[in-house]
């Protein structure tokens, strides 16, 4: 939007000066060349649905193009302007796209009084046996944000800091807005205390998930149990395994898609409930291990 605002006056001045047909034809040719090159690049971009792929072996196909087929003159000039001055426009692009990515994370456990749960929210509240509260919503949101933030680390090093900062800012701005409007926390000092607690929770959760990512599924499942299920003693192990499998699948698919998928906000999460068939598969390795362990003698056999 900022780029279009900057270049629109240029287009207006050019039209007022009545550019000659030769110059106009040459300029149009260059702009159309930029558009066609971008469209060709879009054709090779991977899809936006890392949460539930139909078949991991199938090639990735984009759901939507990066650019629309028909661009205005102002849009085409804005693209060229961004190529020449990337540092000037990068923060505006990052702000808009990370807002879309954050919205996708926030919707996973979104709830409203008097409104039925979405399919995703139904899993996180009903299947996981969690109450629909601000804390539950923030925990699930941070989990999905962490998966995307981990993928952002693989972007170009000149982009990572800007994109991650905008992404995190959206979460805290939205959280504070919810505290004021939905929960009626009008006193700034009280709200500030809650925001500090939320910040420490965010840092602790991301550190725990990072450790699980590096050390394996057992550590990752433990981090999810502590931070999503509040270390509940009666947690359903199958549900915990479904969430862990879901996180691993999303991370794997995000790691396989092109950077352009993330940088255009084309990411959609699936539901952990889709992992139930995977979790219920028999593990032949564990069966062999269990079969090799000698049974403990009972009181009757010992006598």
Image (cartoon, rainbow, N blue to C red):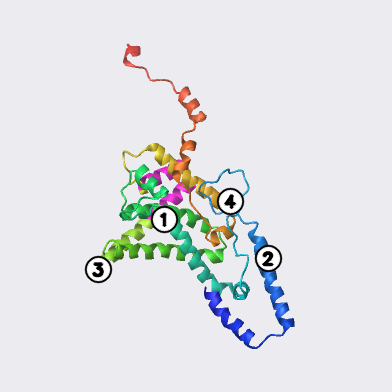
Q: Main secondary structure of the magenta part?
A: helix
Mark linked to residue 107: 1
Q: Residue 150, image x and y in percent?
A: 49, 55
Q: Earlier in the sequence, mark 4 or mark 3?
A: 3
Q: Residue 248, image x and y in percent?
A: 49, 45
Mark linked to residue 18: none
Q: Secondary structure at mark 4?
A: helix
Residue bearing the label numbered 4: 256
Q: Is residue 295 above or below residue 64?
A: above
Of labels 1 and 4, the one closer to you: 1
Question: Which residue is situated farthest in the right direction here?
Answer: 22
Q: Residue 261, image x and y in percent?
A: 56, 58
Q: Earlier in the sequence, mark 2 or mark 3?
A: 2
Q: Which residues are drawn in magenta?
A: 203-226
Assess disc 4: are there few (<14), some (14-19) or many (≥20) residues with their C-alpha within 10 Å of its C-alpha. some
Of labels 4 and 2, the one closer to you: 2
Q: Nearer the viewer, residue 186 or 286?
A: 186
Q: Earlier in the sequence, mark 4 or mark 2?
A: 2
Q: Residue at 60% of width from left, 60% of height from top?
A: 65
Assess disc 1: are there few (<14), some (14-19) or many (≥20) residues with their C-alpha within 10 Å of its C-alpha. some
- Spatial CA distance of label 2 from label 3 is 53 Å
Q: Earlier in the sequence, mark 2 or mark 1?
A: 2
279 left or right, relative to 26: left
Q: Secondary structure at mark 1?
A: helix
């Amino acid at each position: 939007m900022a780029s279009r605002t900057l270049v629109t006056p240029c287009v207006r001045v050019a039209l007022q000066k009545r550019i000659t047909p030769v110059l106009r034809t040459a300029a149009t040719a260059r702009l159309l060349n930029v558009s066609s090159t971008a469209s060709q690049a879009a054709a090779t971009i991977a899809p936006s649905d890392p949460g539930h792929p139909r078949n991991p072996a199938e090639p990735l196909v984009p759901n939507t193009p990066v650019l629309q087929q028909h661009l205005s003159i102002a849009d085409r000039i804005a693209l060229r302007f961004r190529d020449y001055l990337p540092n000037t426009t990068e923060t505006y692009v990052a702000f808009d796209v990370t807002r879309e990515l954050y919205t996708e994370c926030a919707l996973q456990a979104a709830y409203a009084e008097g409104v039925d749960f979405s399919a995703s929210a139904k899993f996180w509240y009903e299947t996981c046996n969690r109450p629909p509260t601000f804390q539950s919503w923030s925990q699930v949101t941070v989990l999905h944000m962490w998966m995307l933030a981990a993928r952002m680390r693989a972007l170009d090093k000149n982009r990572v800091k800007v994109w991650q900062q905008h992404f995190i800012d959206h979460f805290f701005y939205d959280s504070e807005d919810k505290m004021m409007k939905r929960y009626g926390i009008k006193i700034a000092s009280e709200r500030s205390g809650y925001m500090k607690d939320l910040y420490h929770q965010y840092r602790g959760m991301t550190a725990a998930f990072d450790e699980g990512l590096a050390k394996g599924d057992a550590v990752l499942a433990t981090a999810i149990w502590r931070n999503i299920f509040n270390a509940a003693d009666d947690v359903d192990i199958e549900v915990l395994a479904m969430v862990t499998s879901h996180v691993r699948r999303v991370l794997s698919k995000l790691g396989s898609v092109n950077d352009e998928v993330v940088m255009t906000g084309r990411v959609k999460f699936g539901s952990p409930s889709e992992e139930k068939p995977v979790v219920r598969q028999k593990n032949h390795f564990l069966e062999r291990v269990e079969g090799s362990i000698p049974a403990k003698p009972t009181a009757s056999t010992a006598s």
